[in-house]
């Protein structure tokens, strides 16, 4: 366990309302989530000496948010450029800051406002960087990239629309019991199959629900956590993988994702395996992201995810509960930090109607395509 | 990475109608210059011969100097999508249109994203053999390579 993150814990969680259109600034929403996370663990702004967030240059920064909630002198501030791919590194980075003594109490947040909608780029006039090769062909946004992955998986392994639908339907079923979710009306497989094409083979219900909102979590040492009100949720280990410079077009095997390389690294660092996981918050920008990463993490063989979900193995009473909150598909897209919120809630035993009975370990994945990471939380320190 | 610029009214009466225009840089400019001459050229290491996409100033394997070299323009559809919704500007009259990752014959894994033309979208398959042809990019000064199915290997 020499390379685990043992000794760090998440002690507080907070969030703003998740809505389609808030009319609020990113600073307002991030400050609300940070205040709520601190109140949740009985701390105040005076206790906080670290702040970090990840973004694609679209949000208020750590020093602004810290100032807005009353932190006068921030000792550690780190703004990370990235999206779903960088969530694990950001949370693990906060834990590392705590373990190395750079900070004692760190707030990690992600906020998304109206200016950020990744699924469309209708205002785009010019493209530079790698996008200059794709954009002129009308190929520029994530639903297109991961539909490209999905098609290759269908070609190699015979996965089907019904397999993707099984994921979409079940995540929505879970969201029905989550009052914070933006999409809570149950859907059937027929609803899924009849939803409109976006980027074939993706339909509307393959795509996450982009919204406004913020999530914040508070990371501190296990020692400090022992004096705080909630049962601490310990970080057991984390791993990332980044290949091909993040190029979705050049990534060598579109039937799998970063998780091909992250998974063995994570299981090795934690000494755990899929059978040890009670709750899996799988990053689900799209249904296919769940399919590819679920296979890569070893929950089932290639091409078997549809059967796995249809057999009830990915829900209550099965092998592992996947996205009990409804995920990015149905709770809403807060770029994967809402998965961390849900994992903490479940491991505390505070998830109410959707509590996974006896949950002691949670896998939280982040990212898609050529880069991403994953982290395991547990109720017992490693 | 991508950028958004102020719309130039002279060029862009209706921004939705035109696809995003490329912004060549010091490394990618020869790619676009070759297309303007009706050639498809890709970045290649002058020392070890590795093809590099996206292009680099120096080879990522041996750090040798790179140059652009013509490719045959033939390849295979590695994967593809059929775009039904207007999520990116341009080609709105062509919906649904097909975009593929074309794996070029020169090197395993050397791919270009490109529109596939001359075939019913429902007929496109992974493994389809295709050949580049050149067409003006609507709205600007650029030529792009699109791909059309060919018979045989």
Image (spheres, grey):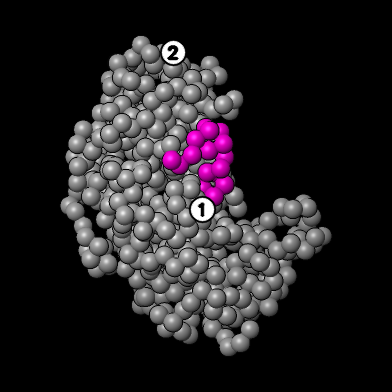
On whether disc 1 and disc 2 are found on a single subunit, the reply is yes
Q: Residue furthest right?
A: B47
Secondary structure at numbered mark 1: loop
Q: Residue at x 55, y 70 (%)?
A: B78
The x and y percentages for residue A306 are 36, 59
| Chain for numbered disc 2 | A
Q: Residue furthest bottom?
A: B151
Q: Residue at x 19, y 42 (%)?
A: A177
Residue A271 among those drawn in magenta: yes
| Chain for numbered disc 1 | A
Q: Nearer the viewer, residue A236 or A123?
A: A236
Is A336 drawn above or below residue A368 in the view shown?
above
The x and y percentages for residue A127 are 50, 59
- Find residue B44 and report its image quarter: bottom right
Residue B127 among those drawn in magenta: no
Q: Residue at x 50, y 50 (%)?
A: A296
Q: Residues within 10 Å of mark 2 (few under 14, many from 20)?
A: few
Inter-mark Cα distance, 1 to 2? 37 Å
Q: Which mark is residue A223?
A: 2
Q: Residue at x 68, y 61 (%)?
A: B52
Q: Residues within 10 Å of mark 1 (few under 14, many from 20)?
A: many
Q: Which mark is residue A257?
A: 1
Q: Quadrant of the N terminus of chain A?
A: top right
Q: Nearer the viewer, residue A262 or B118?
A: A262
The x and y percentages for residue A63 are 42, 26
1 or 2: tag closer to the N-terminus? 2
Magenta segment's dominant SS is helix
Question: CB under 8 Å between callouts 1 and 2?
Answer: no
State left or right for residue B60 relative to residue B152: right
Secondary structure at numbered mark 2: helix
User: Which contiguous range is marked in magenta?
Assistant: A259-275
State left or right for residue A183 relative to residue B134: left
């Amino acid at each position: 366990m020499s390379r685990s993150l043992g000794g760090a814990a998440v002690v507080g969680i907070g969030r703003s309302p998740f809505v389609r259109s808030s009319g609020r600034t990113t600073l307002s929403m991030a400050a609300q989530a940070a205040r709520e996370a601190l109140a949740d663990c009985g701390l105040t702004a005076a206790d906080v000496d670290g702040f970090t967030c990840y973004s694609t240059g679209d949000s208020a920064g750590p020093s602004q948010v810290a100032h807005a909630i009353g932190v006068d002198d921030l000792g550690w501030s780190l703004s990370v450029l990235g999206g779903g791919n960088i969530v694990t590194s950001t949370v693990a980075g906060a834990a590392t800051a705590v373990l190395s003594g750079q900070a004692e109490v760190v707030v990690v947040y992600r906020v998304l406002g109206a200016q950020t909608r990744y699924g469309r780029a209708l205002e785009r006039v010019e493209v530079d960087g790698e996008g200059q090769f794709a954009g002129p062909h009308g190929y520029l946004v994530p639903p297109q990239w991961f539909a490209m992955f999905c098609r290759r998986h269908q070609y190699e392994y015979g996965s089907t629309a019904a397999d993707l639908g099984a994921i979409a339907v079940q995540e929505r079923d879970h969201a029905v019991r989550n009052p914070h979710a933006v999409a809570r009306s149950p859907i059937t497989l027929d609803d899924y199959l009849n939803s409109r094409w976006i980027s074939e083979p993706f339909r509307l219900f393959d795509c996450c629900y982009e919204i406004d909102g913020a999530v914040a979590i508070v990371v501190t040492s296990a020692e400090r956590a022992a004096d705080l009100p909630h049962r601490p949720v310990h970080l057991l280990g984390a791993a990332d993988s980044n290949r091909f410079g993040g190029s979705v077009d050049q990534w060598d095997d579109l039937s799998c994702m970063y998780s091909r390389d992250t998974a063995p690294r994570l299981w090795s660092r934690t000494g755990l395996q899929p059978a040890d996981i009670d709750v899996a918050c799988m990053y689900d920008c799209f249904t296919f992201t769940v399919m590819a990463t679920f296979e890569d993490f070893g929950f089932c063989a290639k091409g078997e995810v549809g059967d796995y979900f249809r057999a009830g193995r990915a829900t209550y009473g099965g092998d592992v509960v996947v996205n009990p909150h409804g995920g990015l598909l149905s709770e809403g897209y807060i770029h994967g930090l809402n998965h961390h919120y849900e994992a903490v809630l479940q491991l505390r035993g505070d998830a109410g109607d959707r509590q996974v009975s006896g949950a002691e370990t949670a896998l939280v994945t982040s990212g898609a395509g050529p880069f991403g990471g994953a982290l395991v939380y547990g109720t017992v320190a490693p | 990475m991508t950028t958004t610029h102020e719309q130039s009214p002279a060029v862009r009466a209706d921004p939705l109608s035109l696809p995003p225009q490329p912004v060549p840089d010091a490394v990618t400019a020869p790619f676009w210059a070759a297309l303007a001459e009706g050639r498809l050229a890709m970045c290649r290491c002058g020392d070890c011969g590795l093809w590099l996409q996206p292009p680099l100033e120096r080879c990522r394997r041996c750090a040798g100097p790179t140059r652009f070299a013509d490719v045959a323009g033939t390849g295979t559809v590695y994967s593809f999508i059929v775009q039904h919704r207007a999520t990116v500007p341009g080609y709105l009259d062509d919906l649904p249109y097909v975009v593929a990752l074309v794996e070029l014959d020169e090197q395993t894994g050397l791919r270009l994203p490109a529109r596939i033309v001359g075939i019913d979208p429902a007929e496109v398959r992974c493994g389809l053999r295709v050949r580049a042809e050149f067409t003006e990019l609507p709205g600007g000064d650029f030529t792009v390579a699109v791909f059309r199915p060919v018979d045989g290997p």
